[in-house]
Amino acid sequence: MIWASARGCRVIDGEGREYLDLSGGFGVAALGHRNPRVMAAIGEQQVVHALGDLAEAEATLRLRQVLPRPAKLGLSGEDAVEIALRTALLATGKPGIVSFDGAYHGTGLLALAASGLERFRTPFAAWLPGPVYRYPFGDDPGPLPEDAGCVIVEPIQGRAGARVPPAGFLEQLRERCDEAGALLIADEIYCGLGRAGEMLVSGQLADVVCLGKALGGGLPLSAALFRPGLENVWNLGPEDVYTHTHSGTPLACAAALVVLDEVPKLLTQVLRKGEIFAAAGWQGAGLMRARPGDAAKALERGVIVVPAGLENELISATPPLVISDEEIEQALELLEGC
């Protein structure tokens, strides 16, 4: 399928057929495709590309000022995870990673090592770093291994199928990290920035919060948000030892400023719209939902969803947060029996 155009919650393919988009481009288009404010912010930029960690543009500086914590910027969600895991090693000196079954943290080798979906891990198992200790998602892992420098967790699992852990799970992990002198890393790349009805599902519990997907308004941008002071572990000399040519690209940062301004206004509506999905049998929270289904059949009926679940047995709905009630009802009707 070739996307020829996309606007709001609608996509038109190369043959002129229109689809309702319940994927939001993997949750990226939180404000809808080609959001007018996002497009205007991108077009107004006087600097398209600066020098990343050597010389930032004004939009990048303003984004750092607006983010709720000190941040190190990346391009992809996997970058944010990589930054978070390296931060834990720098801060604690301990290489062990505690993670959970069903977790998806990205496909770079370090992030992949922490992921729990074997279909992604198996082809590259010989190269994966460690040690990694994996536990059932939602369970108290008990006292952490002695060499554990961090626990990394999705507050709501995305690729595994919008899995919500029991109440108190994150608080229990916070206690285990405090006992062991480890960092708690919240991977909110999928569930954060309003997707579940909150800006940050983990609140103030985590030492590092990973953001991505929706942050750039459609352009590549991610961020690892640090507990104040923790960013100082990266003061390792005159050069940044983890960076990219396009880190903090002004266009994406300008779009992110719009996202961070607009999304808080949508949170109440996200929760209400999520209840429409819940009433139709979709598990999850807010507009992060999943149920058994066939993504290929959904596409035939004119609805874009994403395969999800431990065995791809589910379909995932992460639509733009601006989706209307009428569009939700139309999509659910098209998906009946699918």
Image (tube, rainbow, N blue to C red):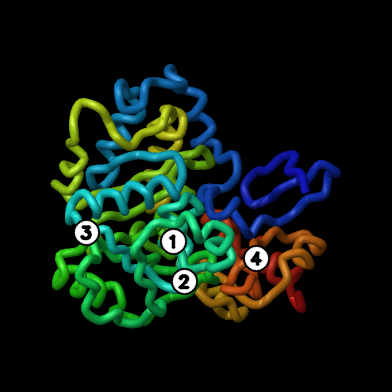
Residue at (31, 53) in percent of width and height: 85
Residue 118 x, y percent position in the rendering: 54, 68
Q: Nearer the viewer, residue 146 or 274?
A: 146
Q: N-terminal of the two: label 2 or label 4? A: 2
Q: Amino acid at mark 1?
A: Cys
Check disc 4 and report the residue beneath it. 307
Check disc 2 and report the residue beneath it. 285
Q: Is residue 236 left or right of residue 133?
A: left
Q: Amino acid at mark 3?
A: Lys
Residue 129 x, y percent position in the rendering: 39, 56
Query: Nearer the observer, disc 1 or disc 2?
Result: 1
Determine the CA span between mark 1 and mark 2: 9 Å
Q: Nearer the viewer, residue 66 or 249?
A: 249
Check disc 1 and report the residue beneath it. 191
* The C terminus sits in image quarter: bottom right
| Above or below 338: residue 24 | above
Q: Are marks 1 and 2 in contact (CB under 8 Å)?
A: yes
Residue at (48, 62) in percent of width and height: 104
Q: N-terminal of the two: label 3 or label 4? A: 3
Residue furthest to the right: 15
Q: For the residue labelled by badge 3, is the local secondary structure a helix, a strand or a loop?
A: loop
Determine the CA span between mark 3 and mark 2: 34 Å
